[in-house]
Amino acid sequence: MKYLSGQRPLYVLVGLFLLSAAMLNGCAWLTQPPQNDAVAQQMVGRWMQNNSGLKSFKGLMQLQIEAQGRSMRGRAAFAAVLPDRLRVELLNTIGQPLFSLASDGEKITLISMQEHVIRHLEPSSGALEPLIGIPLGVEDLLSVLIGRPPLPDFAAAQAVRDDIEQCTVLLKNRWHERLAQLHSGSCERIETLTLYDDRQNEMRYAMTWIDWQTVGPYILPRKATILAANGVRITITVERYWPDISVPADTFTLVLPENFRTDSVPK
């Protein structure tokens, strides 16, 4: 027989390979997934239903971006159709145009008026980082504006048991690693969402909804902040919402200036 002459059958080699892989991965596939907490699931579901009937809106906001000891302030008009179409026109404090941004769900176009530059960005989860210094996507920014936390894919939601009077929920992946923490003092509306790097267990960024306003049937954010691990802070103060308003499709297409250069954005 061949295996008696020094050669091993194929099934033995396959078995040894699988055993080695299991040892190298610490028997990862044998790890039991984290258990879902019914109370935590209920809280997350409630927060994710906030303003669920809102499909489109326009508005005016004050925007401040602070980074490396510098601060940029401006006033912006915005229009959106959920989940991923957005138009923003930002002016500086004396009314001069700074930039125009448009996302039609397939591509993101940015025009910098001061630099005379056109940039095209892929609609990824961190697409806006070259612009604002925080790895946010268009859908994440829209979630901030409607007061609904943008959540990562998670395996389990678990309530923090020592937080009796308030509501704090941890989201974990299949390997029990922390992905996000949500907190609400009133338990009704989300107040803080902190996202973590699941491998390093370090904060990526935190969103805080500070104040709210009633607009028709909706309770929408008046003021919110986004703080990144690199120290960049964005403060959004919404002065006015026009909810459930018709937004033409061409709103999300920019007319490109002929004399502006086009720069590629590193992926």
Image (cartoon, rainbow, N blue to C red):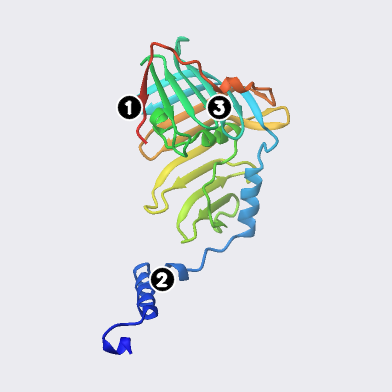
User: Which residue corresponds to mark 1?
Assistant: 69
Residue 256 placement (x, y as % from top left): 46, 16
User: Which residue corresponds to mark 2?
Assistant: 27
User: Looking at the image, which is closer to me, 48 or 235?
Assistant: 48
User: Which residue corresponds to mark 3?
Assistant: 86
User: Looking at the image, which is closer to me, 152 or 204?
Assistant: 152
User: Looking at the image, which is closer to me, 181 or 53?
Assistant: 53
Residue type, label 2: Cys
Residue 81 placement (x, y as % from top left): 62, 29
- Separation of residues labelled 3 and 2 (CA atoms): 45 Å
Q: Quadrant of residue 234?
A: top left
Q: Is residue 121 left or right of residue 167?
A: left
Q: Earlier in the sequence, mark 3 or mark 1?
A: 1
Residue type, label 1: Gly
Element type where label 1 sits in the image: loop
- Separation of residues labelled 3 and 1 (CA atoms): 29 Å
